[in-house]
Image (cartoon, helix red, strand yellow):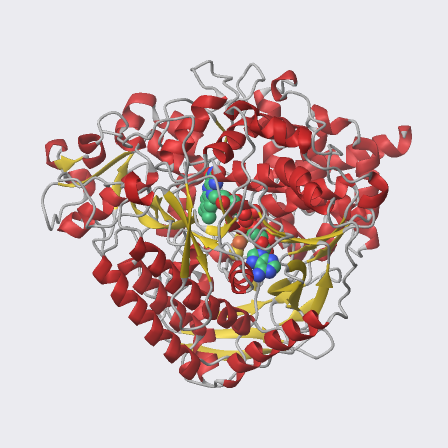
Amino acid sequence: MKLHLKIWRQRDAQSNGALVDYDLDGIDQHMSFLEMMDTLNGQLILNGDMPVEFDHDCREGICGSCGMMVNGQAHGPVAGLTVCQLHMREFKDGATIYVEPFRAAAFPLKRDLKIDRSAFDRIIQAGGFISASTGSAIEANNLPITHDMAESAFDSAACIGCGACVATCKNSSAALFTSAKVSHLVKLPQGKLEAEKRVIQMVGQMDVEGFGHCSNTEACEVKCPQGISVLNIAMMNWEFNKSSLLG
Amino acid sequence: MILNAKIPDGPLEDKWTTYKEKAKLVNPANRKKLNIIVVGTGLSGSSAAASLAELGYNIQSFCFQDSARRAHSVAAQGGVNAAKNYQNDGDSVYRMFYDTLKGGDFRSREANVYRLAECSLNLIDQAVAQGVPFAREYGGYLSNRSFGGVQVSRTFYARGQTGQQLLLGAYQALIRQVGIGKVKLHTRHEMLDLVLVDGKAKGIIVRNLDTGDIERFAADAVVIATGGFGKIYYLSTLAMGCNASAIWRAHKKGALMACPSWTQMHPTCLPQAGDYQSKLTLMSESLRNDGRIWVPKLKDEKRKANEIPEEERDYYLERRYPTFGNLAPRDISSRAAKERIDAGFGVGPLNNAVYLDFSKAIKEQGIDKIREKYKNLFSMYKKITDDDAYQAPMKISPAAHFSMGGLWVDYELMTTIPGLFAVGEANFADHGANRLGANSLLQASIDGYFILPYTLTNYLAGELKTEKITIKHRAFDIAEAEVNEQLQLLVNINGTKTADHFHKELGKLLYDKCGLSRTAKGLTEAIAGIELLSGKFYRELRVSGTEGEINAELEKAGRVADYLEMARLMCYDALTRNESCGAHFREEYQTPDGEALRNDKDFCFVSAWEWPGRGIEPILHPEPLVFEFIKLSVRSYS
Ligand SMILES: Cc1cc2nc3c(=O)[nH]c(=O)nc-3n(C[C@H](O)[C@H](O)[C@H](O)COP(=O)(O)OP(=O)(O)OC[C@H]3O[C@@H](n4cnc5c(N)ncnc54)[C@H](O)[C@@H]3O)c2cc1C
Ligand code: FES
């Protein structure tokens, strides 16, 4: 395949960035999108240019490292995928592909497609855990949890923290990310004890970090590689209001 | 050097309890004065850092990803073992101990393995308390499944994402301590050297990957939890950034490396499709519970899988290992696949795969049941290959997966450098020559949650009175200067080939000569080949940019430089072990029907290697394995 790439290049947060054109030939349609980027980088290096910086690690859709806007969509055109799982067979020979970083005020750019998502860590730090120090646990089967509730908690817990939800949202809201953790923990009996404090603090941190408000467009769910449901946001709102009123 | 594993005396069942009862303590007021560096935030590093912080120590924690939650533990799919015996199917701590020891082909220590099985009970409790959403039965109790190489169901799982969920539990425990102020987390920092003062580990040199700055950190003890180095084979199930650098630099500072050539090749991975490929994705081993593995009986078979009639299929695992069949342990399954592929029966466009077929299970259990069990795996398969495994068998092949070898540690998980500990996949400890499925999430967690808090405390109790070292110490100047020199060396070569080029070459060479099967001749050639490749690397490498900025190419180049040295040691390790055991199969040592021939008389030891300096042959220090409680048997699965 032949491709025309338009890739966002920016040296650092302070510099101006721009889309730069690259023509690439001999791309195999079974390559993954990141393998295509590797191929480009290999050529750039040998030409004495700087390769395009992007985050990636597991390359199997689970670590949440990768993420870029491909033709204006977070992780590219296919639903339910991270960009590391996207394959070139999804594109036509001769296609023009725009590649840009995830953009949000709370995700400052580091270089090219690399961004700083540490705000997510700080949201979890604000309360996205159960305070169970090592050694204090009770025998696991003394705490039965219904099959369906365990599965439902899992559905929320499956978030990989990639940031596609934020990048997709017109308000750059982190509601899907935050609510997934709030819901995961509140669905489980062991997570209920700290539920009130947790939701208030996590939502508070979301604001501190500069994420926008959720206006229920539900675009985040569509672009979430893990299929995290917007019902989590409803649950977070419910928990938040309950805690604010009663707490 | 005489290696002392420091195994406590007494009956097997009492050793760990005895150790804990006798270990020295540090009082809470003094713990606040002690600093510990933990490199790595995978299951082992996060659990260690969180548990030690809970005790009151000050922790500096490091990882190279942009968040601690992205460590490669996140990718584990299948599950985690524990001898809870919830299924009432005859499991026990002893049975798990024996399965693990036997699975490892009797090349690990009885006492360590027993402790692993013993502590497995608490791990499940701990994970559930943290909110890990393990699979449950309809009655609300925890569900289990069985994994390769054992006959009981002792594997706990969270759909196909057990590693992710366990890691999130540990990450959340870690990040809670960051909030409390007991852990200082440094993401995007790569350890590039270990600093010794008076022979003890007292600090590290790291590169800040976001700025290129070289930074120093001092502490009273250092824990290495940097995971496996299977990525040395280039194509592997590991993440792109997995590396041997931290353990290798520690090795060069004096820590012995144990059995580095023992690499597990996982039998159920997606085969390589082309030269551009950057990794081989694992399809969980749990698929072997319902999938049947076969190749055509006819060489150069041109028909599609579904068109080949039953009697023309060779279910070679069922044929060779009737008791375990498709659930035979990983080393055996992988080798059997390689045997068929090498004999010309491989399938797929490159003839490098075997079939994993679900048609019988779908017929017997219905497609819905199979979908419920494996939905995410089947859809992952579809995403990558564009093929539908409900309609036609998957194509799979073996790939480099897990490093049984690593830094040599004693019973306390301390390396041969006082104050330097190694946990998780980075150490050589419990898995012997072959790791059983679902045992390493366990080992990584146990090391961090339950063992290190005792053993590290025991060490630190002796450090209270020693002089506090700061980063102004001369040892830091020297180490930092060496790191800078190495980085500049790589940047300045200015050749014509990328780091990936050399990494791929090295990977091919290792798969070929130090992979699923090895020979003395091949290994000797490999050592020469690596020598040549290293020479080319330092002449022809090209890295763009400088060391003082974000530079992913430079990171890669540094890792490849260490891999080249590690690979050489792996080949010496494999060459000097004149037997076949577990993942280490030497073609010269096999039975007439092609099974591994172990040699307990001459090789019942752990090979621990000393770095003698560049270009000199590594020095072997054997640690004899003494079996007091069990009798060595032939590991037969037929
Ligand atoms: C695809 C796959 C599936 C698996 N499935 C299972 C399974 O089902 N059951 C099971 O029991 N086991 C499984 N395993 C094995 C198991 O996941 C690992 O052995 C285990 O998670 C390793 O944990 P760890 O803490 O030792 O290392 P990791 O989780 O790999 O963490 C390593 C950490 O070290 C950091 N690091 C590395 N190098 C440096 C450096 N130089 N400087 C600073 N930081 C560094 C990284 O940033 C990371 O934080 C699987 C492995 C793979 C690859
Ligand atoms: S690289 Fe891990 S999710 Fe894409």
B267 over B548 or under it: above or below = above
Counting from the top left corner in percent of width and height, residue B341 is at 20, 49
Q: Residue at x 62, y 22 (%)?
A: A140
- Given residues B265 and A158, the one toward you in this image is B265
Quarter the C terminus of chain B occupies: top left
Left-right relation of A67 to A60: right
Left-right relation of A96 to B285: right
Counting from the top left corner in percent of width and height, residue A247 is at 90, 30
Instruction: Work out which residue is located at the far front of the displayed protein and give it.
Output: B2
B50 over B146 or under it: above or below = below
Counting from the top left corner in percent of width and height, residue B251 is at 52, 60
Toward which corner of the image does residue A132 lie, by quadrant? top right
- Given residues A111 and A133, the one toward you in this image is A133
Counting from the top left corner in percent of width and height, residue B240 is at 49, 60
Left-right relation of A46 to B342: right
Residue B368 at least partly seen = no
- Given residues B610 and B134, the one toward you in this image is B610
- Given residues B583 and B106, the one toward you in this image is B106
Residue B250 at least partly seen = yes
Q: Residue at x 42, y 26 (%)?
A: B629
Toward which corner of the image does residue B44 lie, by quadrant? top right
How many numbered marks appear? 0
Q: Residue at x 78, y 40 (%)?
A: B26
